[in-house]
Image (spheres, rainbow, N blue to C red):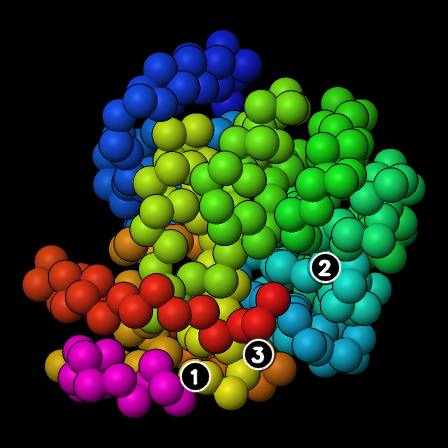
Amino acid sequence: MMKKISIFFLALILMFSMAGCGAESVPQTSGAAGEAGVFDLEQGTVLLNSGYEMPILGIGCFRLSQEEAENSVYWALRDGYRLIDTARIYGNEAGVGRGIQRAIDEGFVTREEIFVTTKMWTDDYDDGAAAVDASLDRLGLDYIDLMILHHSQPENDVEAYQAMEQAVADGKLKSIGLSNYYEPEGFDRLVNATTIVPALIQNETHPYHQSMEMKEHIARYGTVMESWFPLGGRGNTQTLFNDETISSIAEAHGKTSAQVILRWHLQAGNIAIPGSGNEAHIQENFEIFDFELSEEEMQRMTDIDKDQRFAAY
């Protein structure tokens, strides 16, 4: 997992993806093995445009305390997850690092099998190099698989992204990306001022906000979508769970609404990182690789898009 492809092959991928910038394109969930942007639903991975394989289902650590994050990460790695998502502003990077180390010490995983994501907060954009080093120190890691700029901030996000580019050159980061860039113009502004094309964008994405415009736009660059609030987020999950379309599909498969939503994300080409401090829910959220939504069910899910965000930020 997380194997690096050759620089020559990566160059070809980027050349062909950029050559198609004038044509409509959407993320793929099927295609040739090893093709960038294609979701491998059997292996549970996607090849990023940076050349690294990334798991497509992970554990999110938003709003978890240090102790909760440590336990959630430990439980998730024990249950088979290999993608961990946190952020400096969550205040739990140290807990995440302890959870990772516990799982490694107990032999569940090796460091190389885990894909760790964190995010640089906007207050740190003026000194991105220091922010990278601080996250590495809090996590207790020698490298971070993916670092993301947490929000669009035109006055200094280019400089922060360039600091992450330097950290890639220095071997501190493997891949870099963006979060909360909701307009194609904002994405293009940053891409046109920097060198490394973002591997992914992490935006609020769920059945009521399916992010199709941005997914079509970023796919032209080989960039994939990652969903935060994939189940709607705290206070909104029941709205989605009780949606008639979702609940009826869940009943037909003998699955929960949460499992149907997460399976929809993966088949729609969204990396999903549901957050939870509940051991049973963490296990339940991972049990989505033993069934498949039909084309008709996927269309029914597409039809409930309301372009409705739940978060106020």
- What is the span of residues highlighted in magenta in the rendered image? 238-251
On the image, numbered disc 1 is attached to which residue?
237
Look at 23% across and 71% down and name the residue there: 304
Q: Residues within 10 Å of mark 1 (few under 14, many from 20)?
A: some
Q: Secondary structure at mark 1?
A: helix
Percent of width and height locating residue 70:
74, 73
* Callout in the foreground (1, 3): 1
Q: Is residue 100 magenta?
A: no
- 141 to the left or right of 219: right
Going 25% across and 32% down the picture, which residue do you hit?
Answer: 24
Q: State the residue position of label 2.
A: 87
The quadrant of the picture occupied by the C terminus is bottom right
Q: Which residue is mark 3?
A: 276
Q: Amino acid at mark 1?
A: Thr
Q: Is residue 101 visible?
A: no
N-term-proximal mark, 2 vs 3? 2
Which residue is at a point 49% across and 62% down the rendered structure image?
204
Please say if 308 is above or below 38: below
